[in-house]
C-alpha cells in the first residue's frame, strides 16, 4: 500500500512538471541545480549508478536507490522502463523520501531529515521573499539608519577671578639671509654681476639752446 503511494506521488510530480525521467533530462536538471533528489531503480546497472553519483555531485543533491525495478518505475511515469528519475520540487521530494523512510527507516531516515531541513529553509526564504514583495507593493521601505553624531569637544575651564588671561605670543618668522659664499657682489638673475649705480643727470629734461640767439654781444651792438 505504501509503495503504491510512493509511485502515485511520482506520477503526480510528472504531471506537474516536477519530475525528470531518463539520463539526459536528469543530467540537465542536476547540472542546473534544480534537482532535489535523484532516484535510482533497484535493478539498474553499475554504470548507471556511477553516472547518478556524478550527477548528484554536480548538482549538490541527494541520490537514493529505491525499492522499485525499472519496469515498476517506468510504469509509474508512463514508460515501459525507467532507470533514473529526478524530483525538482522540494515539497514532493520530501514527501517521497518520507514515504520511503516509513518503509525502511534504517535506510532512508537520514535522507528524510536532510530533505526536511532543506524544505524548512526553502519555506523561510519563500516567506521572506513574499513579505519583501508585499512591502514593495505597499511602498514600504526599511527605515534609514540615523547618522552617527560626532562627540562635542571638551569645554575649557574658565580662568579664575583676578588672573589675567593668557595670550598666545606669536613669533614672526624673520627670513634668514644667507651671506654670499664668494664674498663679492650679489649676482643678478642672469648669472652676471650687477652694474654700479650712477648719479642722475640734472640736465636730462632741459631744452637745447640755439646758437647765435640770446648772445649778450649781439644785444650790445643793436643798442648802439
Image (cartoon, rainbow, N blue to C red):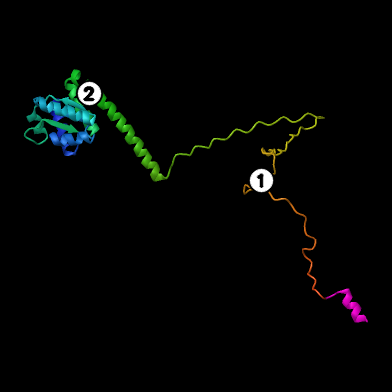
**Element carrying mark 2:** helix
Residue 224 versus residue 10 in the image, above or below: below
**Residue at point 70%, 50% (across, down):** 195
Q: Main secondary structure of the magenta part?
A: helix
- The 10 Å Cα crowd at callout 2, few under 14, some 14 to 19, many 20 or more, is some
Q: Is residue 65 left or right of residue 128?
A: left
Residue 41 in percent (x, y) is at: 11, 27
**Residue at point 31%, 32% (across, down):** 123
**Element carrying mark 1:** loop
Quadrant occupied by the C terminus: bottom right
Q: Nearer the viewer, residue 115 or 34?
A: 34
Q: CA distance from mark 1 to mark 2?
A: 96 Å
Q: Quadrant location of residue 75?
A: top left
Residue 119 within the magenta-colored segment of the rendering: no
**Residue at point 39%, 43% (across, down):** 136
Q: Nearer the viewer, residue 174 or 168?
A: 174
Q: Is residue 95 visible?
A: no
Q: Nearer the viewer, mark 1 or mark 2?
A: 1
Residue 215 within the magenta-colored segment of the rendering: yes
**Residue bearing the label numbered 1:** 187
Q: Is residue 54 left or right of residue 185?
A: left
**Residue at point 14%, 36% (across, down):** 24
Quadrant occupied by the N terminus: top left
Residue 38 versus residue 217 in the image, above or below: above
Residue 172 in percent (x, y) is at: 72, 38
Earlier-in-chain disc, 1 versus 2: 2
**Residue bearing the label numbered 2:** 111
Q: Which residues are magenta?
A: 213-224
Number of labels in the image equals: 2
Q: Is residue 113 visible?
A: yes
Q: Nearer the viewer, residue 172 or 115?
A: 172
Amino acid at each position: 500500500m505504501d509503495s503504491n503511494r510512493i509511485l502515485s506521488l511520482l506520477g503526480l510530480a510528472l504531471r506537474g512538471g516536477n519530475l525528470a525521467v531518463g539520463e539526459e533530462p536528469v543530467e540537465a536538471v542536476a547540472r542546473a541545480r534544480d534537482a532535489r533528489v535523484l532516484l535510482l531503480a533497484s535493478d539498474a546497472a553499475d554504470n548507471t549508478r556511477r553516472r547518478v553519483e556524478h550527477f548528484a555531485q554536480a548538482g549538490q543533491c541527494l541520490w537514493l536507490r529505491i525499492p522499485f525495478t525499472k519496469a515498476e518505475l517506468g510504469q509509474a511515469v508512463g514508460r515501459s522502463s525507467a532507470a533514473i528519475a529526478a524530483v525538482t520540487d522540494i515539497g514532493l521530494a520530501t514527501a517521497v523520501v518520507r514515504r520511503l523512510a516509513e518503509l525502511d527507516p534504517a535506510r532512508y531516515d537520514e535522507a528524510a531529515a536532510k530533505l526536511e531541513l532543506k524544505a524548512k529553509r526553502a519555506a523561510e526564504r519563500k516567506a521572506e521573499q513574499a513579505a519583501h514583495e508585499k512591502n514593495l507593493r505597499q511602498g514600504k521601505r526599511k527605515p534609514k539608519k540615523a547618522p552617527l553624531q560626532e562627540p562635542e569637544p571638551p569645554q575649557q575651564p574658565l580662568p579664575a577671578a583676578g588672573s589675567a588671561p593668557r595670550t598666545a605670543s606669536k613669533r614672526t618668522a624673520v627670513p634668514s639671509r644667507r651671506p654670499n659664499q664668494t664674498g663679492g657682489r650679489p649676482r643678478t638673475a642672469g648669472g652676471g654681476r650687477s652694474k654700479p649705480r650712477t648719479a642722475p643727470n640734472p640736465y636730462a629734461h632741459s631744452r637745447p639752446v640755439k646758437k647765435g640767439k640770446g648772445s649778450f654781444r649781439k644785444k650790445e651792438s643793436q643798442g648802439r
